[in-house]
Amino acid sequence: MSIKLSARVQAVKPSPTLAVTARAQTLRAAGKDIIGLGAGEPDFDTPDHIKEAAIAAVKGGFTKYTAVDGTPELKQAIIAKFQRENGFLYTPDQILVSCGGKQSFYNLAQAILDPGDEVIIPTPYWVSYPDMVLLAGGAPMLVHAGADRKFKITPDQLRASMTQQTRLVVINSPSNPSGVAYTRAELAALGEVLLEFPRAVIATDDIYEHIRWADEPFVNILHACPDLAPRTLVLNGVSKAYAMTGWRIGYAGGPREVIKAMKKVQSQSTSNPSSISQVAAQAALEGPQDCIRTMTAAFKERHDYMVERLNRIPGIACPPTDGTFYVFPQVKGMIEALARVGNDLDLAEFLIERAGITLVPGSAFGLAGHVRISIATSRENLERALGRIEEVASEVIEA
């Protein structure tokens, strides 16, 4: 008997980045030599002082339910982080701790979107934004921000996309997958447009805040346009900066009424995040921060190496990034040169089969003709992977 599934769940796709990671694991288990360049997580271990705080919490019996919105101690650590690093002043009822940054955005979409509400999402986008909007009954409105626009939308594009139905505008800077960050001046110009549309809520996803090497210090839209604070949600978490992806702690700061609604959604889904993970996240935010600098320096070195070598391969054009641990090269020339490869999806499959490399096709992020390559792996793995890609490219040239 076939069980009818909801139209809602049939409208969304499984996460392609998680699917690529699972594919790599399956192939390795089958004995194949696979170099995984698809995972969106640091290859470093969680720092010892964070793990030790979690172990102490377990031994101390801190294994029960907590408040839905997070422990008072972690919320105070988040408030202190926002004030110390960003200059933002929040009270505890303006903070929500969730099971990862993904749940923060999911809670927001469920809390503010009604059927037909439009959500402006610059393209390329993090893979889950459009589908979480669909799950909330909203309508993703994708705004092209390709390589020709340096992966950023302009004020004119934003204004042309805004309607009376626009309920949410998403900004992710530095961006997954492009690695590009908006400057203060660019965010100020976008903010001037958003001030014209008082119904629209803004979500600034700052999860890659600390993994950056651009000359300008980190800024988000509230630094550039403070007048937007009454309707802006700042989303962040500990997964990327502290190598804590599996601990699943994200957080949001914003208007009380929106945070309260997001808390209500969370209370009926997961309830509180893991008590032990919350202790670990508190240790991350309150403890030494040198681990971030160490990891970021390694990512920058790998980034420079990858960009230089990728740009020497025929058919690939790889712009430098401002941060994150991804590069997002254009691969149209390679696609055109390879027989039986018609698009970036085909190319990703070809590289798995021929070169033993997994990466994520740009189509998963809404921008065909590109691939996202994670540099969150060892220099040795990157060298091996590039050697394999170069070998495939040389075969094409010789043919």
Image (tube, grey):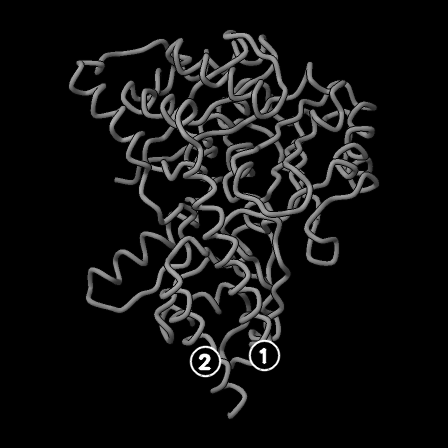
Residue appearing at x 25%, y 40% in the figure: 1
Q: In the rendered view, would you say 330 is above or below 73?
A: below
Residue 88 in picture, x, y percent from top left: 62, 18
Regarding mark 2 in the picture, which secondary structure is present there? helix
Residue appearing at x 65%, y 44% in the figure: 181
Residue 168 falls left or right of residue 195: left
Name which of mark 2 and mark 1 comes first in the sequence. Answer: 1
- Image quadrant where residue 57 sits: top left
Residue most toward the bottom?
398
Front residue (pair 237, 255):
237
Residue 195 in picture, x, y percent from top left: 80, 23
Q: Amino acid at mark 2?
A: Val
- Image quadrant where residue 89 sits: top right
Residue 17 falls left or right of residue 207: left
Please rate how many residues cluster around mark 1, counting C-alpha atoms within 10 Å: few if below 14, some from 14 to 19, many from 20: some
Regarding mark 1 in the picture, which secondary structure is present there? loop
Front residue (pair 158, 187):
187
Residue appearing at x 27%, y 69% in the figure: 33
Cα distance between the residues tagged 2 and 1: 10 Å
Residue under label 2: 392
Q: In the rendered view, would you say 33 is above or below 178?
A: below
Residue 351 in picture, x, y percent from top left: 42, 70
- Image quadrant where residue 312 sits: bottom right
Please rate how many residues cluster around mark 2, counting C-alpha atoms within 10 Å: few if below 14, some from 14 to 19, many from 20: some
Residue appearing at x 43%, y 25% in the figure: 285
Q: Amino acid at mark 1?
A: Pro
Residue under label 1: 314
